[in-house]
Image (cartoon, helix red, strand yellow):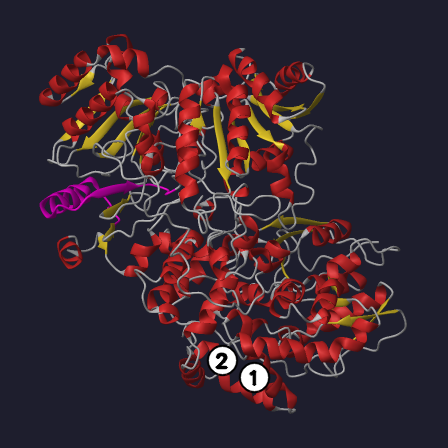
Amino acid sequence: MIRSLAGELSGIVRTDLTARTAYSSDASLYRRVPVAVAEPRSVEDLERIRRVVVGAGVPVTMRGGGTSVAGNSIGDGLVVDVSRHLTAIKAIDPEARTAVVEPGVVLDDLRAAAGVHGLTFGPDPSTHARCTLGGMIGNNACGPHSVAYGTTAANVLELRLLLADGRQVTARRGGIDDLELERGLRALRDAYLGPLRTELGRFERQGSGYGLHHLLHENGFDVAKALVGAEGTCGIVTEATVRLVEPPKARALAVLGFADVYEAAEAGPAIAASGAVLTVEGMASDLLAALRARPGRQRAGADLPSGGGWLYCEVGGESPEAAREAAHALARATKHSVVVDEPRRMRDLWWIREAGAGIVTRLPDGGEAWPGWEDSAVPPERLASYLRELYALMRTHGLRGVPFGHFGEGCLHVRLDFPLRTRPGAYRAFVEDAADLVVGHGGSVSGEHGDGHARSELLDRMYSPEVRVAFAAFKHLFDPGRTFNPGVITDPEPLDERLRPGPGADRLTITPVHALSRDGGSFTAAVQRCVGVGACRVVSGGTSMCPSFKVTRDEVHSTRGRARVLAELLRGESLRDGWRSTEARDALDLCLSCKACASDCPVNVDMATYKSEFLHRHYAGRVRPMTHYSMGWLPLWSRLATSVPGVAGMANAALRRPRVAKAVKFAAGVEPRRDLPPFAVRPLRGSLPERGGGRPVVLWPDTFTAFHTPEVGRAAVTVLSATGHRAVLPPRAVCCGLTWQSTGQLGIAKRVLRRTLDVLEPALDAGLPVVGLEPSCTVMLRDEAPELLPDDPRAHRLAASVVTLAELVADVDPWPFGTVDQDAVAQVHCHQEAKGSYAPDLRVLERLGVRTDVVGSGCCGLAGDFGFARGHWDVSQGCAERELYPKARDAPLVLADGFSCRVQIVQGTGRRAVHLAELLADALRTGVRGSDRPPSGGSGRPRPRG
């Protein structure tokens, strides 16, 4: 079957195991390894897919952003991913306030296009930066602003569908342009009028089953709305016409604090019913505690008022003053409140709520929590009592969770610490009891995420036999052969069948080299951090991950896709070669090890570390790629090349000869279009300026500074001296081991680190700060060394001793530097952005008078050995072209502390980027150095003043 699909759908379908395993799950508990993955580019491609799969009897599952938490977008047959190519916004009519879109359009892209006309699409789930319109239509997605704008169903005007028999039909209010289907739908409606009126459409967030109440006379026989929420079970949506709305001109956010989450749940519905608000979002203090347990998030939520539960009430107005006054009017009704209207503070507060689905997968004590019962809803006035009884039920079952959700509409999200590994039966036991509880409150097992594999079986508990028969008849009218997403809504599969975590998930167990301290030393638990919320799939703004996905738009090259492949490797069913798996190697190949996921991912997936662990085992006892020997061993080669006078100069001269350079790059596995960085003719050691008195600090002589750009180190010594410090180099060669660690040569990395600690031990005993100039090495010493040598207390002492130059200089007094009147573009090293902070650097630049535009696209694309390795050129350049290159080409001054960043900039734009140490040293003397041309309109280098 796989070979047949690949042959008949050549150019559309991928049948390799790397792709198939990357699509084995979404954001749910479930896994299904498809037989193939399709990436259509047109409706004609969709028709080819339909014709082949129907003939072969292969089921089809449609997929957008893959952010479904109910397992709606995974299947055993063909998964059709529309998010890569079917992304056209075909038309926007500002007068009619409508848009016509393909199903793969990301919501934020539609909102941006509509925003040009002062309009937006109302529903906005927390995944708005990566969810697609097709997925929103499939699940009837809502989001916080549905209080004001309604669900997706309320905003869909027309749907174009491709059916299993090849018919292309258009559904709208009043009917469908197919006589046979229209007759069948009217007969279905008339046969079940009573149950449809009494059991469906009872409250806004009743999201379970098909929306057949939209077929009623009083609802306009709206077939389009009836198909919203069908979860891809009736046909393929090829085009949608949606309603746009005009958002308020100004907004303000009133955050109301309550004693506990129950009081917040009691207050929410009345506030929503007032019609004065755009959102009524609730969360408990547990969510904040879970967030603050994350590294670097200890001050998260500092703007929140006191309390144990909160409501986020956003209001609009014709002016900022009107919005602010409306927010204050709300705030006056509660004892504890905060009103925020500054955009950055509003974004920071909203981030807490929007990241909730990821945050709550780890409880405050580090315990795992899972979806499965995360989307129940009740009539809003019943929410507080339902929440109390749900907590009581959780205690009865010995479970914990962190609630949050759309309190104004009675929709609750909570993830629970189901003991899936030790007591998998506990999952079914709780979910069945919880379903009975929510039904007893007149509620729905799904409020906006659909039923999928998680809740379809529970529809028997929620609806009468008549309604379930009506559901089956509706499915049969559109898809009599059960081609589309079988086992969802009708004929459900057992809700506890084929779970992703649990028994069997870790047949391939290992003792990792890294401590993986956040995951109890378990590589499986670390990989399962990825819950699939898909933040790594955001392309425009919001996050620095995942650079390769931003370029390729390939699910395999997202952090989530790689995590799914690794999970399948550990399971050992679909990927049976263990650590020798070429599929896992291929999935990890375009990972830049930029570390962005370690901070930007809501659950801090650290794919760079997982890649290192995999490479360590994959190449054990085998020949590695040549770049692992050339670039991975760069510290050794650089030291050798510069240790004998004259050798570095001869090597540089030889590499300037094209034939020699070509041969060397071929032998080293280096991309032919790359230039090899030259060696320093005068290395750092032995070429430092005279050092006077002052407080001693250890200047970390990283490989790049010591043997390639010693001018940076010399500038740092000058700066340290001017600020009252005396730079001291370690007595012997040291190295952080980064190049070996990133290429998975972990045994060597640990030996290098131990030798380094031996050399530094006297300095550590003396309590001397260790000043790092290269951000990647600084992060290696601070974060990775203790993970590689967890039992060596010296590694932890070293981590605590490391400071950056900016951290040491930012608050120095007296300030010895002149004022630099200069505009600059700054490329922050990806490791510093992920595991450190650029705030001290910005303070320094502000004191210097430098007006800084920070590149926001993340990794420069070179990333250590990544950009040098053959086969990575296009992705490497694609990363840089997104923002770095365009800004660097036009900037008067380019700043970059990372050696890789500076190499990428000079090789890609011809611009020389300046290290902060050089900028500071020049501010002590005559001017800013390193800008290869004067600022626009100038005739020379800018000079410091003062």
Tag 1 or tag 2, which sits nearer the N-term? 2
**Magenta stretch?**
38-66
User: Is residue 19 at least partly visible in the picture?
Assistant: yes
| Element assignment for label 1 | helix
Q: Classify the position of the C terminus by image quarter.
A: bottom right
Front-most of 520 and 97? 520
Q: Residues within 10 Å of mark 1 (few under 14, many from 20)?
A: some
User: Is residue 734 at least partly visible in the picture?
Assistant: no
Name above or below for residue 763 compared with residue 335: below
From mark 2 to mark 1, how far is it between C-alphas? Answer: 8 Å
Judging by the rendered image, the residue that carries numbered circle 1 is: 637
Q: Classify the position of the N terminus by image quarter.
A: bottom left
Image coordinates for residue 596, horizontal then vertical, percent? 54, 54
Is 41 one of the magenta-colored residues?
yes
| Element assignment for label 2 | helix
Is 927 one of the magenta-colored residues?
no
Judging by the rendered image, the residue that carries numbered circle 2 is: 630
